Amino acid sequence: IEQIAFIGSGPLPLTSITLLRESRTLKKIINIDCDHTAIELSKSLARYNELDNKMEFVECLVEALTAEQIENCQIVLLA
């Protein structure tokens, strides 16, 4: 598994951080949330943990997601 999408990642992307730290193959996690403040806090936490190069953040409602945004993900998690 190289890429995961996490819908509803929230302000504390602890699952994403743990997955990235524990996996040998995971290259990227796309964190998706509809709350602007949650996305901004998540970005800050990713930078603090030096994982911002492996985490992407998308602010949108789940119904606004396009197939192209998650087409390369082998797993899609829904919180």
Image (cartoon, grey):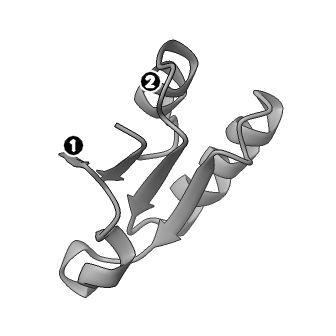
- Give x and y (percent) for residue 63: 18, 81
Position of residue 63 relative to residue 56, above or below, is: below
Residue tagged 1: 79
Quarter-of-image position of residue 72: bottom left
Q: Can residue 65 be seen in this view?
A: no
Where is the N terminus found, in terms of image quarters?
A: top left
Sequence-earlier tag: 2 or 1? 2
Residue 50, image x and y in percent?
80, 32
Q: Which residue is drawn at 29% across and 71% down?
A: 71
Q: Can residue 12 be seen in this view?
A: yes
Which of the pair 8/53 is nearer the observer? 53
Looking at this view, is 1 or 31 the one in front? 1
Q: Is residue 57 above or below residue 13?
A: below
Question: Which percent across, then down, holds residue 19?
Answer: 44, 24
Q: In this view, does 17 lie to the left or right of 49?
A: left
Which residue occupies the extreme top position in the image? Answer: 22
In the picture of the structure, the residue carrying the numbered disc 2 is: 19
Q: On the picture, is 75 further left or further right than 1? A: left
Amino acid tagged 2 = Leu
Task: From the image, state whether disc 2 or disc 1 is nearer to you.
Answer: 2
Local crowd at mark 1 within 10 Å, few (<14), some, or many (≥20)?
few
